[in-house]
Image: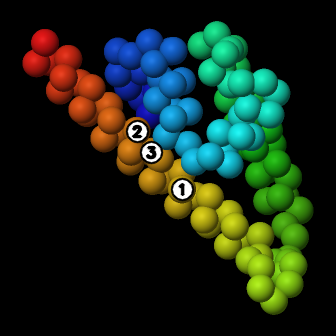
């Protein structure tokens, strides 16, 4: 979305904060593992996110080249594919929320 719309006129700092506050607590904790994520400069925060995306894409490419069978950990736990599906649904929900918040901000700015 940022590549397509060039940040919607928001600063990098605002984008980072909107993104971070749209995450669920466990995901925020992952970003905070190296220190409080929002204490980074906007450029540092973007770099951290880009690095995580690149790492994920590298992992995704590896798993497509060497597909592994579905693994069921135990009868009561999800397999890896269902965990991935849940994460993708959360990402879609977060994207929808981000778009909604952006539209609210845009409307407020127009009214000013």
Left or right, 28 with reference to 60: left
Label 2 Cα neighbours within 10 Å, binned few <14 / some 14-19 / many ≥20: some
The spot of residue 33 in percent (x, y) is: 80, 34
Label 1 Cα neighbours within 10 Å, binned few <14 / some 14-19 / many ≥20: some
Q: Nearer the viewer, residue 12 or 63?
A: 12
Residue furthest left as drawn: 111
Q: Quadrant of residue 38?
A: top right
The image shows residue 5, relative to residue 11, as above or below, that is: below
> What element does badge 2 sit on?
helix
Q: Which residue is mark 1?
A: 90
The spot of residue 89 in percent (x, y) is: 53, 61
The spot of residue 29 in percent (x, y) is: 71, 40
Which circle marks residue 49 in the picture? none
From mark 3 to mark 1, how far is it between C-alphas?
9 Å
Q: Which residue is mark 3?
A: 95
Contact check, label 2 and label 3, Cβ < 8 Å = yes
For marks 2 and 1 on the same chain, the one whose residue lies earlier in the sequence: 1
The residue sitting at 69% across, 67% down in the picture is 83
Q: Which residue is mark 2?
A: 98
Residue furthest bottom as drawn: 75
Name the quadrant of the C terminus.
top left
């Amino acid at each position: 979305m940022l590549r397509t719309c060039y940040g919607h006129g928001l600063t990098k700092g605002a984008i980072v904060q909107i993104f971070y506050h749209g995450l669920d607590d466990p995901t925020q904790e992952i970003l905070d593992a190296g220190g409080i994520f929002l204490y980074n400069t906007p450029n540092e925060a973007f770099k951290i996110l880009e690095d995580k995306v690149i790492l994920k894409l590298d992992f995704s490419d590896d798993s497509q080249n060497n597909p592994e069978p579905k693994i069921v950990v135990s009868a009561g736990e999800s397999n890896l594919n269902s965990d991935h599906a849940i994460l993708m649904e959360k990402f879609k929900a977060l994207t929808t929320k981000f778009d909604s918040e952006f539209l609210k901000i845009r409307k407020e700015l127009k009214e000013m």
